[in-house]
Image (cartoon, rainbow, N blue to C red):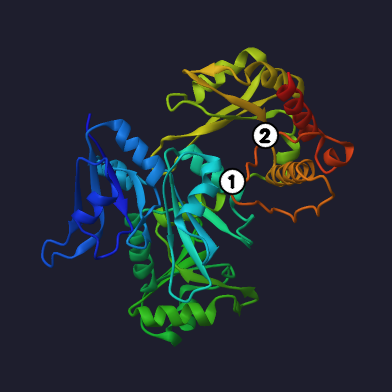
Amino acid sequence: MESSLYVGELGPEVNDDILKQHFKLAKSVHVCRDRVSGKSLGYAYVNFHRAEDCSHTLRNMNYSLINGRHCRLMMAEKDSNKRTQGTGNIFVKNLPASVDDKSLHDTFSQWGNVVSCRVVKNPNAVRCYGYVNYDCVSAAERAIELVNGSILFGREIQVGHQIPKSEREAVEDQSKQQQKFTNLYIKNIALDVTEDDIRGLFTAFGPVSSILIQRDEYNNSKGFGFVNFENPQDAEKAVHQLNDQEYRGKKLFVSRAQKKSEREDELRRQHAYQIPVEKPVKYQGVNLYVKNLADSVDDDLLREEFARYGHITSAKVMKDERTGASKGFGFVCFTSPEEATEAVIRMNGHRIASKEIYVALAQRKEDRRNFLEAQISQKSASSSSSASPVQSRQQLQPTEVVNAIPPQLTLETLQPFSPETQRQMLGERIYSIM
């Protein structure tokens, strides 16, 4: 069966003959060129008779040098929809200029199967950024969760989802539209203020086409309203001059009037993945984290599988907001710590829809970071015969496996964690030596 590789980061002088010499197992090669100018587009496709030859080349020749440049290989994807979805893509910011494609690939391979990596550098810049493409959403989520804000390559880096170009352009277009507006929203208006008062206040900035103060069924002011200017420049001046200004004993709030869809989108962004302050305490010891879920597993199936161990208050499979596809992990919340502990013991390693799942007590982000620090410190101590300095907070070394079980657990190691996290650490340690 014929297989193909995509070859990127090619120099403009690379042609088919050079590629044939480089990829000796290839059946055919094709450098993609501009139809008008005939200039190379910087990438090519290499075809193989056998899938084995294709896989061998991908494993052994990725980031190899072609005319002084490291080429970037990945399996060619014929389905254009899959190429543009980008559900497993993440971006990595604040990288030092010394990082190349291969070192980025090797480092981020710890958290999943990397399909492709690319570092983008600007001439004379001391920092750069890159992209990592995983083969599944769950790996991308894992990398973001564990690496974002950590020290990598000697810097604190930022990691997040890569936003597809079409969505970035849509946001930019919306931003441009928002820059020009005429309709203003005003709230915190004193209840005795009338439309004429508002007109006198706002016409100082330009002609006003309409004014509305919202009122109840008894014609009493609700304390908010709208002012529409004829010119966007006048509306913008009014916002800058009147927002946060006191009028009739009350400080006004003045801003561009948003459409309902815009308000809903903003609320979703603000509250996505937020947990109220009281919830971590309320759910300590009863909320389980479940990962490696098959794509077919939904909330109902997740609840059904865990229901035999106690009363479940919620079962949720996390999904991508844009596509609705499962992220491969979820949460199950019981009413008591005893039920949750029993479920961890019985369900960790259990198969659901042909995949072996991982189950553990859900941890707060701070506890997870402390756990990782303890793992790294223990690993460093066990690999050196002499005492070595403890690594600084959130410091991860490139290509270091961060999910290994610490070789030993001491009171000093356990002390920084909550009782629930201590039980989990002890349980994982016991499980690893059984």
Residue 237 lies in quadrant: bottom left
Classed neighbour count for the residue bearing mark 2: other residues with Cα under 10 Å, few (<14), some (14–19), many (≥20): many
* Marks 2 & 1, CB-CB < 8 Å contact: no
Q: CA distance from mark 2 to mark 1?
A: 13 Å
Q: How many marks?
A: 2
Q: Is residue 308 left or right of residue 335?
A: left
* Residue 171 numbered tag: none
Which residue is the site of mark 2?
362
Q: Is residue 183 left or right of residue 151?
A: left
Residue 404 lies in quadrant: top right
Camera-side residue of 338 and 414: 414
Kindly give the residue lying farthest to the right in the view shown: 411
Camera-side residue of 138 and 230: 138
Measuring from the top left, give residue 90's x and y in whole percent: 46, 51
Q: Is residue 268 left or right of residue 421?
A: left
Measuring from the top left, give residue 428's x and y in whole percent: 72, 27
- Residue at 32% x, 54% y is 8
Q: Secondary structure at mark 2?
A: loop
Residue 121 lies in quadrant: bottom left
Q: Amino acid at mark 1?
A: Glu
Inspect this view and state whether residue 336 appears: no
Inspect this view and state whether residue 138 appears: yes
Which residue is the site of mark 1?
145
Task: Check the image and report above or below for 1 versus 260.
Answer: above
- Residue at 89% x, 37% y is 411
- Residue at 36% x, 74% y is 180
Measuring from the top left, give residue 265's x and y in whole percent: 45, 53
Query: Which quadrant does the N terminus fall into?
Result: top left
Q: Secondary structure at mark 1?
A: helix
Camera-side residue of 344 and 204: 344
Classed neighbour count for the residue bearing mark 1: other residues with Cα under 10 Å, few (<14), some (14–19), many (≥20): some
Query: Which quadrant does the C terminus fall into?
Result: top right
